[in-house]
Image: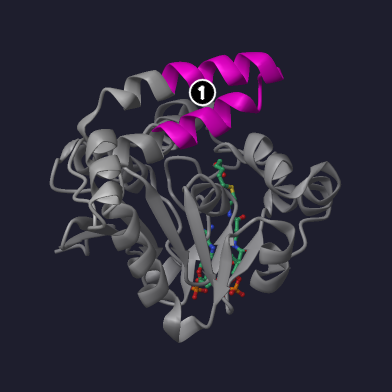
Amino acid sequence: MAEPQILIEREENIAILRLNRPQALNAFTADMLVQIREALDRLGADVGVRAILITGEGRGFCAGQDLSDPFVAPNPGGKPKDIGHLIDHYYIPMALALRDCRVPTVCAVNGVAAGAGMSLAMGCDLVYASDAAVFVLGFNKIGLIPDCGATWLLPRLVGRAKAMEMALLGDKLSATDAELLGLVARTVQAEQLFGAAKAAALRLASLPTRALVETRRLFDAAQRSEFEPALRAESRAQSQLGFAHDYSEGVAAFMQKRPPQFDDR
Ligand code: T3D
């Protein structure tokens, strides 16, 4: 029987999603993209899950699209394949499922993150990288443009100049440089990466989920907004969150000098 392309485990109130094609540095197949999207939707809707940790099996995190996948692999002499179909029906739904995930997401980048694999990492809420990880867009070497959200995410994270250099020259970026540039939140020694990322996911899982996810939404929305509309959007979100149980629980816990028990999703 074929190995599953992703693995899901549950630990306490977090879910761990592992990309599981280590022989190809966890390169995406079309099936795998569907499985990741379905897992994000399913786990996000599960009230027992309050954070999702994404990582890769083996020495790589994800090498982007599997270039040998018959779904897209060029077919010299045969009928040309429309890569846009793959993007529209597989990559975009996965990228949107990640952006709209109902719980916070943590990425543990355990090795190379290339092409759309780098986009997957950048799309997570909290990105920790192993000191052995490297980031490379790589699209320039196959005559394509950065996709799966990379044109939106990368310049916002590292600035246009560095994003252009990474996209046009396609050089690898070390995890240390990725942290200095703001591409990842933290670089951790390889052997400590999973523990650190899991601890962060467990911390997120103990916090008020709706407020965390609203923070993500507002940070993203503010990128396309003037200052005053951002202030108004904050006010509307705050108003809604103020009606939620987690707000009264947080304030009560503070006043009573006890740890809060957040459970409102
Ligand atoms: O159709 C479309 O392409 C549209 C979709 C776009 C989304 C994208 O993500 S496009 C970008 C696709 N990804 C790449 O172009 C990256 C290709 N890979 C590499 O440049 C290098 O493998 C890495 C920089 C990622 C890692 O280099 P290194 O030296 O650490 O490992 P390696 O020896 O190159 O690879 C190890 C194995 O993984 C090797 O297989 P083998 O020889 O041991 O049997 C290699 O062929 C395989 N592998 C790596 N990347 C891919 C892959 N197999 C299929 N697809 C890959 N993307």
Residue occupying image coordinates x 44% and y 76%:
193
Residue occupying image coordinates x 14% and y 41%:
47
Residue 120: in sight, yes or no?
yes
Residue type, numbered disc 1: Glu
Magenta segment, which residues?
Answer: 214-237
* Residue 239 percent coordinates (x, y): 38, 19
* Residue 177 percent coordinates (x, y): 73, 68
Q: Disc 1 marks which residue? A: 234
Q: Is residue 105 left or right of residue 253?
A: right
Q: Is residue 247 left or right of residue 141?
A: left
What colour scheme governs how the chains and residues are painted in the rendered image of this protein?
one colour
Q: Is residue 140 above or below residue 2?
A: above
Q: Is residue 134 above or below residue 160?
A: below
**228 falls in the magenta region:** yes
* Front residue of this view, candidates 194 and 252: 252
**196 falls in the magenta region:** no
Mark 1 lies on a secondary structure that is helix
Residue occupying image coordinates x 69% and y 20%:
227
Considering the whole magenta stretch, tell me its main secondary structure. Answer: helix
* Residue 4 percent coordinates (x, y): 22, 59
